[in-house]
Amino acid sequence: MKRALVTGINGQDGSYLAELLLSKGYEVHGVIRRSSIENSTKMSNLKDSIARIKLYTCSLDNHLAVYKLIAAVQPDECYHLAASSFVNYSFEDEVSIIATNFTITHYILSSIKELCPQCKVYFAGSSEMFGNADRVPQNEDTKFNPRSIYGIAKLSSYHVVKNYREHHGLYACTGFTYNHESPRRSHAFVTRKITSGVAQIAIGLTHKIELGNLDAIRDWGYAPEYVEAMWLMLNNPHGPHDYVIATGIPHSVKDVLTFAFAIVGLDYQNYIDTQNNKFFRPSEQVPLIGDPSNIYQDLGWHNIVKLEHIIEEMVNNDLNLLKSI
Ligand code: GDP
């Protein structure tokens, strides 16, 4: 039986990945923050899998704690998903963003190198590493140009992963994931903000959603499919390679609004407050759209569920949550 260690296991991706790995017969070990264990909202993504997972509350920003964790678990595969995933454009709190998104990656790689060098490592990179990209769509050869401290920290992790692969012989790789959504998406992201807003409007709890740039373009995929890509990358017959994980399909925030309001039979134009500067991002000239050709060619992975259906699932989930209160 293969043993997997997943950091950030109670997040959107971690929880779907845990379910996927359990369905494949893995022994699943997961790391969460100590503060999460007593917070039922933060554990809700694991409600269907928690009984079958071995959970650890470990401070990943403590090198010795990471070392001891890896020594105890001795994983065959490690998926490093823990991150401060919300892109902070204000450059506040930079030290903790770098610690979470860079230093921990280094602790994990160095511990694996010492303790179980056969363990394969997946690092959760991000389209934010391309930032203000010089082309659309972006692929694995596109020049990196991060525009946020989050992107800079992720890019630094990518380099350390590459270094451990090329110079220490580790099977370690980075997936450049573009936005990926699901009913487990946090409310900080625009899709969930919209779907929960629509659910509240539909049952009369509010009558407006306040948003930023409605013309912003993103490449939005379906989270359960993205965790399959992560697993495929650690089971790649071509060896460890970095891949863009994306749909390649551009959609605007207006598209998300249209899909979401259609589920409840309303026109979004009647429910949006004038665009609020508070929610605008400073630099978004070039849309972040990924080119998933390489992962399709090497691993046969491509997205299936369309944004319209992802949003439908999210709205229905938010309606059910409100009805169950
Ligand atoms: P991320 O920025 O790609 O990590 O994902 P988000 O879901 O936070 O934002 C996606 C896009 O939606 C960005 O281009 C934002 O500028 C745009 N957007 C427009 N209004 C909002 C809003 O009210 N909140 C957020 N989070 N994003 C918004």
Image (tube, helix red, strand yellow):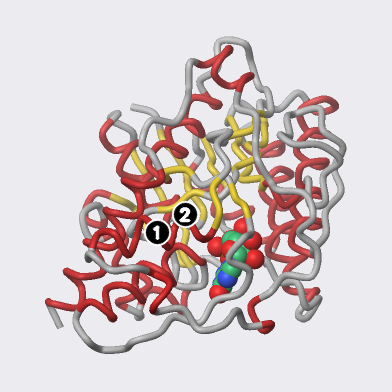
Could you tell me which residue is drawn at 49 percent across and 31 percent down?
Answer: 229
Crowding around mark 2 (Cα neighbors within 10 Å: few <14, some 14 to 19, many 20+) is some
Q: Secondary structure at mark 2?
A: helix
User: In the image, is 275 to the left or to the right of 143?
Assistant: left
The residue singled out by tag 1 in the image is 258
Q: Nearer the viewer, residue 70 or 15?
A: 15
Task: Reply above or below: 300 against 47.
Answer: above
Outermost residue, left side: 324
User: In the image, is 206 to the left or to the right of 146?
Assistant: left
Point out residue 67 in the picture as x, y percentages from the top left corner: 64, 53
* Residue 102 quadrant: bottom right
* Kind of residue indicated by mark 2: Asp
The answer for how far apart the CA atoms under marks 1 and 2 are is: 5 Å
Number of disc labels = 2
Crowding around mark 1 (Cα neighbors within 10 Å: few <14, some 14 to 19, many 20+) is some
Quadrant where the C terminus is found in the figure? bottom left
Point out residue 260 in the picture as x, y percentages from the top left corner: 34, 61
Quadrant where the N terminus is found in the figure? top left
Q: Is residue 273 visible?
A: yes
The residue singled out by tag 2 in the image is 255
Could you tell me which residue is drawn at 55 percent across and 10 percent down?
Answer: 237
Q: Is residue 85 visible?
A: no
Could you tell me which residue is drawn at 22 percent across and 66 percent down?
Answer: 264
Q: Secondary structure at mark 1?
A: helix
Marks 1 and 2 in Cβ contact (< 8 Å): yes
Point out residue 34 in the picture as x, y percentages from the top left corner: 47, 75
* Residue 160 quadrant: top right
